Image (cartoon, helix red, strand yellow):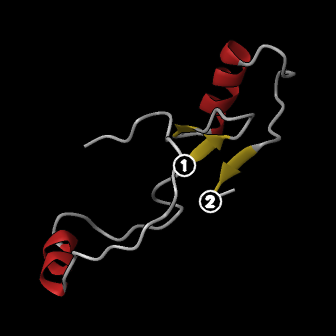
Amino acid sequence: MRLPSVLPSGPAVQDAVCNSEALEAAAKLGKVTSPEQTPIFICALGACNRLFPSRERVLAHRKRDHSDVEAGDDSCMITWNG
């Protein structure tokens, strides 16, 4: 399963159907990771919100898709591993 490159926004809702057995089964499908192991960079210009695996990829995207932004401008970039 792959995440889309643009995540739609929506209100958060409480999960009322998941039980402990479902959580245990889901835990076997994935693994716990850290920011160092899973870099995520998000272009936060306007409503873009596209996901990228590196700072360089975000900057290339901005140069291509946000031509009004100066080259190397890393403002409005969200990441959890700075």
Q: Quadrant of the N terminus?
A: top left
Disc 1 marks which amino acid?
Answer: Ile
Q: Is residue 10 above or below residue 19?
A: above
Residue 20 percent across, percent down from the top left: 18, 86
Question: Residue, x 29% and y 68% (percent of image)?
Answer: 31
Q: Earlier in the sequence, mark 2 or mark 1?
A: 1
Dot 1 falls on a residue whose secondary structure is loop
Disc 2 marks which amino acid?
Answer: Trp
Between 44 and 9, the residue placed more toward the observer is 9
Residue 24 percent across, percent down from the top left: 17, 80
Residue 24 in the figure: left or right of residue 44: left
Question: Residue, x 62% and y 59% (percent of image)?
Answer: 80
Neighbourhood count class around disc 1 (C-alpha, 10 Å): few under 14, some 14–19, many 20 upward: some
Dot 2 falls on a residue whose secondary structure is loop
Q: Is residue 19 above or below residue 31?
A: below
The quarter of the picture where residue 19 lies is bottom left
Question: Residue, x 40% and y 36% (percent of image)?
Answer: 4
State how many labels appear: 2
Residues under labels 2 and 1: Cα distance? 7 Å
Residue 2 percent across, percent down from the top left: 31, 40
In the image, farthest residue toward the bottom: 20
Q: Quadrant of the C terminus?
A: bottom right
Between 71 and 66, the residue placed more toward the observer is 66
Question: Residue, x 13% and y 74% (percent of image)?
Answer: 25
Residue 3 in the figure: left or right of residue 74: left
Q: Tell me the residue that label 1 is attached to.
A: 40
Residue 26 percent across, percent down from the top left: 19, 69
Q: Is residue 19 above or below residue 61?
A: below
Q: Which mark is residue 80?
A: 2
Residue 81 in the figure: left or right of residue 8: right
Instruction: Kindly check if marks 2 and 1 are in contact, taking CB atoms under 8 A apart as contact.
Output: yes
